[in-house]
Image: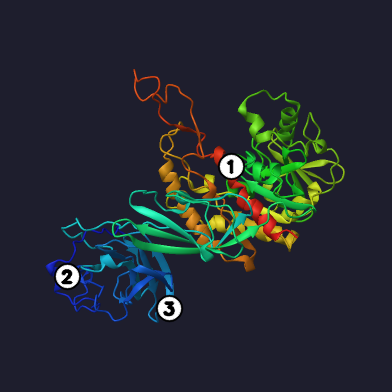
Amino acid sequence: MKTCLLVMAMASAAFAAQAPGNASPADRSPAAIRAINRFNPDDPDIILGRYLFKDRVMNNPIYFVSGYMDISDAPPNSCLVSNKGNRFTSFFDQDKKYLSYVENAHPVPIPPDAAFARISLTQRAMPGLVINVAPPNSEPTADSTAGGKVFVNDICLPSTLYMLSETPNEIFVQPFLKRWRPYNDFVRFSLSGNHPFRRRLSHVATIAEPVDGSILTAELVHGDEFETVKRLSSTIRVGVKGKGSGRVTAQIIGDSYTQGAFFRDALLKSGQVPGLSLIGLRKTAEDQYDEGRGGWRLDSYFTVPIRPGSSFHSWMHPEGDFRYWGVREFWVTAWKCFRKTAGNAFEPNYSCGRFDFCLPRFDENTGILLQPQPGDVQYDHAQSTFLLFDGNAWTPRRQEDFNWRFDYSKYLAMWGFDAPQFLFVVLGLNDFCNQLQADYSQWDQQITTLKNSYLEARPDGRFAICIPCSSCGILDNAAGSFTLKQNAAMWNFRQHLIKQFDRREQDGFYLVDTAITVDNEYGYRYLPKNDITIPYAGCPDDVTLNVQTGNPHPYNSYPTMGVPIAAFIQAFRE
């Protein structure tokens, strides 16, 4: 199949010869099919002040929704092309039943069985709008000046925001704005009941005295005509700081943010969550543990750990009466990290350290499980084999001899944990920060598996996906990372999480927006004066560049990142 090329002008004389919306030409050649303008500006089914989301029509004063445009003559593998680009396009079968939806991509591939299409653009795009079917073997037209994707900025917030009483709850604009364009697009905030903000600035709003059940409204305003492009409303759920005297249990599974204990100030130091006990294998403070592993993705937790230098997790096990205890050589290294005999280098301490709680179960010199039970399994890296304890001896096995699956209940039983009341997952940055066009299907399947496995062990538990960071810092950073592109990729993932998992509490999913607490500029550390921060050779000593370091770890924002999690626990604790 040849790639469909969008190269058409506004409305040429050749297009004008065809009646708009006529989709039944006598000549069914590729050129004739392409020449038809499928958009009829006089279609009585056009709806102003609305936009299209899948098969639903949503309110927005500056958009319009087209009627059902007949594309039943489109050859297989055709594309829908427009001289104004694509914002929202939905396809329907011959009975006008919804089939599929495409956002922003252009040209738009027409799916099999599609007989009708509806599109949404801003009303300013209606004059001269031309929408055509481009058959796969068609040649490009001569004028390519009018083509291209039309970018429209966007915002996305979950339907519920968790805030802590008597606490500055920060809402930074950049994490939930698709593109940060501070001189073109603006976000304005309001609260129902005229409840007060501590501040409402161009880049942040702060609510220090949140009111439970109040509504926060965010409006995206385009500065050319000061049109409200999009309006969102989120209900504020307030957790009372310091409430409760009994024990409350929680677990945090994550990447380097969790390994770096971003939650420490909000959950452990402040006294905002009394009686909190964090459960996990890696020690983060006295009698407090986490499940953070730097550089990990969600998929990493669905991989059987067999590398001695890689961190261990304890959720993948063979089906049946079998329990996997990891790599023997890993436990030897973990003991060395504990004894401080592994050296001072970053590795292996980063990946193999902090497993203090686990170590008494393993021989310090061999890593062998000290009191094995029938069905226990380890991996011997030196022999490149799995070993199964049959009650008398360890016998070799292959990985494919077992059926492996994620098993939260086995994890709890092996380590003697009670199922936590709350489970938070803070993952996604390593998964998608470098993927603008990402496939989220495996992530969705795995997070659902994790949730189901947890709720099987704790039916009354609360499982929360924490929206990961979508403000990875400024372009002037020591690593040279293309942070603006990372921000765009993570905003796409943020939007996906909200569309896929918001309002699904009945299915066991909660969304906690930790990302909106991150300040893209001041949430990061800056380099002291050095060769990198000097603007040019011979520059006066008192002039330096602001260059961030540690990206994408907003260490300065870590204390605020934990606040929504504290609020969530306090809102739902018994």
Q: Residue 571: percent from the left, percent from the top? A: 67, 59
Residue count near mark 2 (Cα–Cα under 10 Å), binned few <14, some 14–19, many ≥20:
some
Task: Report which residue position mark 3 lands on.
Answer: 97
Q: Secondary structure at mark 1?
A: helix
Q: Residue 30: percent from the left, percent from the top? A: 22, 68
Q: Earlier in the sequence, mark 2 or mark 1?
A: 2
Label drawn at residue 142: none
Task: Report which residue position mark 1 lands on.
Answer: 558
The answer to whether mark 2 and mark 3 are in CB contact below 8 A is no
Residue 71 vs residue 429, the one in the foreground: 429
Q: Which quadrant holds residue 211?
A: bottom right
Q: Residue 19: percent from the left, percent from the top? A: 18, 77
State which mark lies toward you, 2 or 1.
1
Left or right: residue 29 versus residue 166 is left
Label drawn at residue 15: 2
Amino acid type, label 3: Lys
Residue 27 vs residue 282, the one in the foreground: 282
The answer to whether residue 573 shows anywhere in this view is yes
Residue count near mark 1 (Cα–Cα under 10 Å), binned few <14, some 14–19, many ≥20:
many
- Which residue: 26% across, 73% down? 39
Q: How many marks?
A: 3
Amino acid type, label 2: Phe
Q: Earlier in the sequence, mark 1 or mark 3?
A: 3
Q: What is the CA distance from the residue labelled 2 to the residue labelled 3?
A: 29 Å
Q: What is the CA distance from the residue labelled 1 to the residue labelled 3?
A: 47 Å
